[in-house]
Image (cartoon, grey):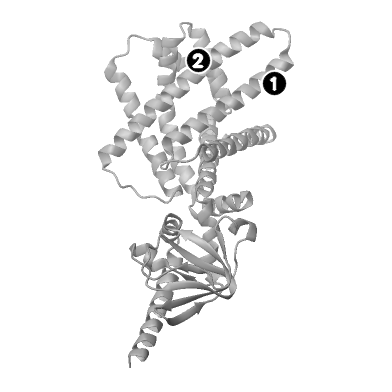
Amino acid sequence: MGWLVLREAVRAFLDNSSLETAATLAYYGFLALAPLLLLVVYFLGVILSSSETVLENMSDFTEHVFPKFSQDVLTDLLNFAQQGSWGVISVVLLIWSLTPFAGALRSAYLRVFKLERTRHFLIYKLGDLGAVLLLLAIFVMLIAINALHFVSSEALLPSSPGLMAVLKGGTLFLLTFGILTLFEKIFVPVRLPLSDLLLGAFTVAVLLAAIRPLFDLLLRFNPNYGYAFGSLKVIFLLIIWVYYTFAVLLFGAEMMAAAWRRETLVLRRLFAGHGRRQPAAVLLERFARELAPGALLFRQGESGPAMFYVLEGTIELFVGKEKLRAMQPGEHFGEMAMLLEAPRTATAQAGPEGARLAVIERGNFDVILRENPGIVLELLREMADRLKETNLKLNGQAD
């Protein structure tokens, strides 16, 4: 299942043009970076009384998140944040300037999870505003906690620079992992299990930890990278890094989406290509149902909350005492009653050799139909042919 989720995440990442989406998010993110850092510096100044402490911890944070980030920018932001008094309107305008970035990110996650906007524009805008406020609170609190942690750690381990470096690196990784988990919780448009959220956050944290030294290595062996931009080289490198970061973030989102729909990934292969490439038997075990020879599956007139796919053996369908047909391996039945929430139109029982079925519930089938239009077309054709065959048979019996 893990291999299936990983493969689907890679495929969806390419099919959804996630690199192009990452470029769009990098543009919004770069525009939002200055007001975001300014607000973080301002609120940190309220929590931490010392400006040196604020600058030191913001420097540590930006050094970990953004390679080659100019510390002069932080100094200017700190000086600007300390000049005069900030009014409520100034803070509100800065926070509001971050909402386009939150909206672009939310739209990207909707595409990843293949969902459409169904709420009013104002509701989404209020949601973006709430996401911005939560992100600000998370960044400010984590950096403040990080400051207190390292002050106490340096007091306890003053003569162990190696151990201090390991402690610092591990703590920063855990902080990154925690930030990403909360970040995913805010922007993911569906209610995910905690395990899926942790999977996405861990994937992004590991990839960021891996590409950071690779990016530093590139700059070490190619110091003139971005040289054509002159004095704007630092900005160019920052944009490139933000682009890489969002590409990794979107891949983590694809991992979460694939894990979230892992059951439909298994069942989808039953319908793709008329079941010629069935999933591994171990993946189908959770959906499988065995029937002894002649065993009854359901009666005509009963409710139909699920449909069935024949994996082995045969299923015979009867209307009254008349046998309509025998469903062979690779064929499915029961979808009409399930989709229409109507009673079963026939009785189903196992053939002489018994049967092994895959039970497909309504929720999984809805996801398969919504995300695979090609399968929908094939199902409609098959249902039309089956209805035509049944009508001809019944009309022949009536004559």
Q: Residues within 10 Å of mark 1 (few under 14, many from 20)?
A: few
Q: Hey, what amino acid is under mark 2?
A: Ala
Residue reaching furthest to the bottom: 399
> In terms of sequence position, does the residue under pointer 1 or pointer 2 come before the other?
2
- Marker disc for residue 29: none
Quickly name the residue at label 2: 144
Residue 196, visible in the rendered structure: yes
Quickly name the residue at label 1: 166
Q: Residues within 10 Å of mark 2 (few under 14, many from 20)?
A: many
Q: State left or right for residue 101 relative to residue 246.
A: left
Labels in figure, total: 2
Q: Hey, what amino acid is under mark 1?
A: Val
Q: In the image, residue 118 lies at what x, y percent?
A: 30, 47
Badge 2 marks a residue whose secondary structure is helix
Residue placed at 42% from the left, 69% from the top? 299
Residue placed at 62% from the left, 48% from the top? 2
